[in-house]
């Protein structure tokens, strides 16, 4: 009879062991950045819809195909070398035009990486070194305005018809930068500040790793995006804060993720940096501020509160082809979780080895290794 009394205790012990990486969640998941979590594997297509768009290759339309923006009707891509030419494709991948306004006149840009596609207003907004330039979708200059003084603009994203949102990363590389808010909402018409978003923090920190070798200073930045469009909200990450926030369209900051222990007092500093966010999962990296450290990739199950070290694989491969869940691409489209480009020569090689299936296999069968890339879109359901 005494053995019978052990059953509830045994059941409780088993339940406690199974819940070792589970937490009660009220919408905010807390991550222990010092903990080693169990492993898990996921297939991308099990929680996001995937679309492939082969970019047309002709004598006129040859490009590296790095995505800048995915609109409802057009795709805007750039080249990495020189960063001069923007190429416009339709949503089926057919080439429309090239835009090259590279130069040093008042109507030209030097640097085009920070670009916004504003289809509603028929404009392309480019943040250059010293100013912001606006062109129509044909590449004709419309207007320009000065950037915010003492700020460094990062991760520009469409906010609404009248404005865009961006992060000030001036402190990432300069500890003596002028103190100001982390995020700003700026007018597309004249560059005026419509709203500042101050993230609560104890003191300013930088997650950038910097070191010197002789007279040369090197730096290594985390690969996450600091502004992640999610439905009608934005996920905002300020490295100096112990909390990642949701920013709503009625201008409220709502805690989304938190971390323990606090960043302050850690040596070396360890940062919690989110990547792709879906309805079910949030992917984050634990980034240690040391040159030889390896970032740890985690998946947070928003439904159960469980946390895992996680690898995500593309289900259109017969082999385990990992998907990068932390760069988010640069697209600005709230219906897209992330976008990436896939090199044609890599797809051709995988096809010849029998490593592809489904729609990706069909596309790869039509490619030559020198063709333009294929854009992969992972979309919310």
Image (spheres, rainbow, N blue to C red):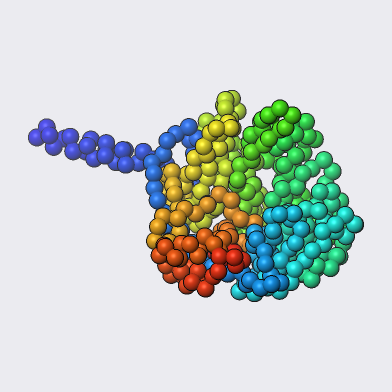
Left or right: residue 194 compared with residue 13: right
Residue in the image at 62% along x and 72% along y: 56
Left or right: residue 27 compared with residue 251: left
Q: Which image quarter holds the N terminus? A: top left
Left or right: residue 294 compared with residue 222: left
Residue placed most toward the observer, 142 or 241: 142
Up the image or down, 101 lies above or below 262; here it is below
Q: Position of residue 310 (x, y in %)?
A: 44, 47
Camera sees residue 186: no
Up the image or down, 67 lies above or below 120; here it is above
Camera sees residue 342: yes
Using the rendered view, name the quadrant where residue 339 is placed. bottom right
Using the rendered view, name the quadrant where residue 308 is placed. top left
Residue in the image at 45% along x and 55% along y: 321
Q: Position of residue 237 (x, y in %)?
A: 63, 44
Residue in the image at 41% along x and 49% along y: 304
Residue placed most toward the observer, 346 or 133: 346
Residue placed most toward the observer, 250 or 180: 180
Q: Position of residue 258 (x, y in %)?
A: 54, 39
């Amino acid at each position: 009879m005494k053995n019978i009394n052990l059953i509830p205790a045994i059941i409780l012990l088993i339940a406690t062991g199974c819940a070792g990486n589970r937490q009660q969640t009220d919408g905010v998941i807390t991550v222990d950045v010092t903990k080693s979590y169990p492993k898990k594997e996921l297939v991308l297509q099990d929680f996001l819809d995937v679309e492939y768009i082969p970019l047309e290759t002709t004598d006129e339309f040859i490009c590296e195909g790095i995505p800048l923006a995915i609109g409802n009707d057009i795709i805007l891509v750039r080249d990495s070398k020189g960063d001069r030419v923007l190429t416009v494709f339709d949503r089926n991948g057919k080439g429309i035009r090239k835009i090259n306004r590279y130069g040093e006149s008042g109507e030209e840009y030097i640097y085009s990486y920070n670009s916004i596609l504003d289809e509603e207003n028929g404009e392309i907004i480019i943040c250059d070194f010293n100013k912001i330039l606006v062109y129509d979708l044909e590449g004709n200059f419309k207007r320009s305005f000065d950037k915010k003084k003492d700020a460094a603009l990062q991760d520009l994203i469409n906010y609404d018809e009248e404005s865009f949102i961006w992060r000030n990363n001036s402190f990432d590389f300069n500890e003596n930068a002028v103190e100001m808010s982390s995020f700003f909402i700026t007018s597309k018409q004249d560059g005026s500040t419509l709203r500042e978003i101050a993230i609560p923090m104890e003191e300013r920190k930088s997650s950038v790793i910097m070191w010197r070798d002789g007279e040369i200073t090197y730096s290594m930045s985390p690969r996450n995006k600091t502004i992640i469009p999610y439905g009608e909200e934005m996920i905002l990450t300020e490295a100096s804060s112990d909390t990642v926030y949701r920013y709503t369209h009625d201008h409220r900051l709502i805690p989304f993720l938190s971390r323990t222990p606090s960043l302050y007092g850690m040596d070396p500093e360890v940062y919690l940096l989110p990547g792709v966010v879906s309805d079910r999962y949030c992917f984050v990296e634990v980034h240690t501020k040391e040159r030889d450290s390896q970032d740890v990739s985690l998946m947070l199950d928003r439904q159960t509160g469980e946390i895992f070290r996680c690898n995500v694989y593309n289900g259109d491969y017969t082999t385990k082809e990992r998907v990068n869940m932390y760069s988010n691409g640069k697209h600005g489209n709230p219906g897209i979780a992330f976008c990436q480009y896939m090199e044609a020569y890599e797809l051709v090689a995988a096809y010849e080895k029998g490593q592809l299936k489904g729609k990706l296999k069909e596309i790869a069968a039509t490619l030559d290794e020198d063709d333009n890339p294929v854009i992969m879109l992972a979309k919310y359901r």
